[in-house]
Amino acid sequence: MLRSLFLAAAGSARLERLVESAPVSRGVVRRFVAGGGAEEALVTARELADDGLAVSLDHLGVVTGSLERAQAVRDEYVALLARLRATGLTPAAEVSVKLSALGQRLDEKVAFEHARAICAAAAEAGTTVTFDAEEHTTTDAVLETVLDLRRDFPSTGAVLQAQLRRTEGDCRELSTAGSRVRLCKGAYAEPESVAFPSPLDVDKSYVRCLNVLMSGAGYPMVATHDPRLIAIAEDRARWFDRSTGEYEFQMLHGVRPEEQARLAAGGHTVRVYLPYGTQWYGYLMRRLAESPAAVAFAAKAVSSRK
Ligand code: FDA
């Protein structure tokens, strides 16, 4: 119920204007978002790297209304990658990219060329790119793009969402040697025809997908904060004889930092997904949708200003 409310809010332009201009939003945003620009993101990335955590930086952006904006997003990533290299943050830091922010819904070819330019800049900087998963209507296009890009940039990462019924099959197809696959539950409101409606069924799907990825030839990136799924992933890694360098855990900035530290102290690679940018509204609503703890945090921030 709460989840659907926040996911519906994520798509409301009116609410977006209201929340973005409310002073109280800033404190809540700061917990989940590194800052408005690359400078602040680099500072946070450095702090995380100093704590022994890997990072994936995400420049927040909504679907772009024009190809000019898509080009600006490409330029932002290319410049960011150069700075990550110059500040010695690669290879510990990589980037996460949404194809929609590169204009995929406006012109697939242009978006592909932008994605290529970002992959080339990442290769030059000695690091990798992972393409985020978005609404199910884009899954085929995103996965095809990743497979195309892998011809020249084999380490390009894909993201699969356990909530989608198709995902176990996608895991099988993507479990090839060297294939970097991030498995998450899925953050979008999807129809029952394509997605499991019950959280328990999503969790069961996540475990089936984990089994496929951990027993396969690729590099699984286990993206969850769910204690049960983390324990199952550790168990499967042992069962399938994977050493700690042959998979990684991933979590969002600001979510369960103590668990991130615990896993890293245990010798695991832990990558923190670190968003930055001014267009944080949709991202924040998706975070509030998935966690009573995050809503409680937001409510506390609001009430403490009264
Ligand atoms: P879930 O939200 O069900 O939470 C399970 C448990 O985790 C909770 O019961 C609680 O114990 C703990 N928990 C969760 N959030 C907490 C909080 N804020 N504070 C304290 N405890 C908390 N989605 C997508 O559609 N496309 C994508 O490309 C990505 N990319 C991505 C990258 C990374 C690195 C991560 C971690 C996640 C994504 N996601 C994503 C988001 C993902 O699909 C999902 O919405 C969130 O990770 C939340 O799902 P969980 O697996 O954490 O479980």
Image (cartoon, rainbow, N blue to C red):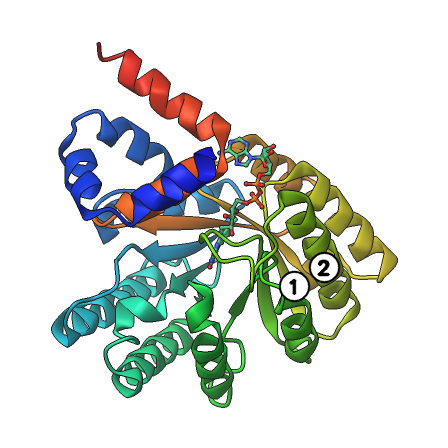
Residue 257 location (% of width, % of height)? 52, 34
Q: Is residue 27 above or below residue 305?
A: below
Q: Which mark is residue 149?
A: none
Residue 28 location (% of width, % of height)? 31, 30
Q: Residue at x 73, y 54 (%)?
A: 207
Question: How many residues crowd mark 1 within 10 Å: few (<14), some (14–19), many (20+)?
Answer: many
**Helix, strand or loop at disc 1?**
strand
Dot 2 and dot 1 residues touching (CB under 8 Å) = yes
Q: Is residue 225 above or below residue 157?
A: above
Q: Which mark is residue 220?
A: 1
Q: Is residue 289 above or below residue 235?
A: above
Q: Nearer the viewer, mark 2 or mark 1?
A: 2
Q: CA distance from mark 2 to mark 1?
A: 8 Å
Which amino acid type is shown beneath numbered disc 1?
Answer: Pro
| Quarter of the rendering containing residue 123 | bottom left
Nearer to me, 285 or 1: 1
Q: Is mark 2 within 8 Å of ligand 1?
A: no
Residue 247 location (% of width, % of height)? 67, 60
Q: Residue at x 30, y 34 (%)?
A: 30
Which amino acid type is shown beneath numbered disc 2?
Answer: Leu
- 10 vs 272, left or right, is left
Nearer to me, 132 or 157: 132
Q: Is mark 1 within 8 Å of ligand 1?
A: no
Residue that extends furthest to the front in the rendered view of this protein: 193
Q: Is residue 127 visible?
A: no
Q: Is residue 112 visible?
A: yes
| Quarter of the rendering containing residue 2 | top left
Q: Quadrant of the C terminus?
A: top left
- 215 vs 249, left or right, is right
- 73 vs 171, left or right, is left
Question: How many residues crowd mark 2 within 10 Å: few (<14), some (14–19), many (20+)?
Answer: many
